[in-house]
Amino acid sequence: MLLRCAFQASAMAAAIGGLAFTAGVGFGVAAVGAACLLRRGMRSRAAWQEDRLAGGAGTPEEPILTGQEPSSPAMPG
């Protein structure tokens, strides 16, 4: 009986250890994925800032007129 309990306890410990290992691997993969996404975001932000400072895309331009703006101010009345 004691041998049977020891076997069950060791099997349970192995299962818990396997789950802990799997969870650890999952957290590791999540951390690496988050770091990759963060690095990609920082690269795109740096490129955007370089473009902005160089006068490329992202600088304010003249507003595009659609033809529906009043050509002269309304007359006071």
Image: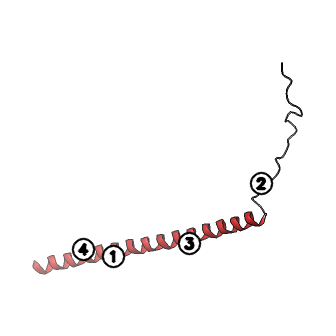
Q: Residues within 10 Å of mark 4 (few under 14, many from 20)?
A: few
Query: For the residues carrying marks 2 and 4, which lies nearer the camera in this image?
Result: 2
Q: Type of residue at label 2?
A: Pro
Q: Type of residue at label 1?
A: Gly
Q: CA distance from mark 2 to mark 4?
A: 65 Å
Q: CA distance from mark 2 to mark 3?
A: 31 Å
Q: Earlier in the sequence, mark 2 or mark 4?
A: 4
Q: Earlier in the sequence, mark 2 or mark 3?
A: 3
Query: For the residues carrying marks 3 and 1, which lies nearer the camera in this image?
Result: 3
Q: Mark 1: which secondary structure?
A: helix
The residue singled out by tag 1 in the image is: 18
Q: Earlier in the sequence, mark 2 or mark 1?
A: 1
Residue 1 position in % (x across, y down): 10, 77
Q: CA distance from mark 1 to mark 4?
A: 10 Å
The residue singled out by tag 3 in the image is: 36
Drawn side of residue 44 relative to residue 18, left or right: right
* Identity of the residue furthest to the top in this view: 77
Residue 54 position in % (x across, y down): 77, 67
Q: 1 or 75: nearer the eye?
A: 75
Q: CA distance from mark 2 to mark 1?
A: 56 Å
Q: How many marks?
A: 4
Q: Type of residue at label 3?
A: Cys
The residue singled out by tag 2 in the image is: 60
Residue 5 position in % (x across, y down): 15, 76
Q: Earlier in the sequence, mark 3 or mark 1?
A: 1
Q: 22 or 32: nearer the eye?
A: 32
Question: Do labels 3 and 1 touch, CB within 8 Å?
Answer: no
Residue 12 disc label = 4
Q: Residues within 10 Å of mark 1 (few under 14, many from 20)?
A: few
Question: Do labels 2 and 1 touch, CB within 8 Å?
Answer: no
Q: Earlier in the sequence, mark 4 or mark 3?
A: 4
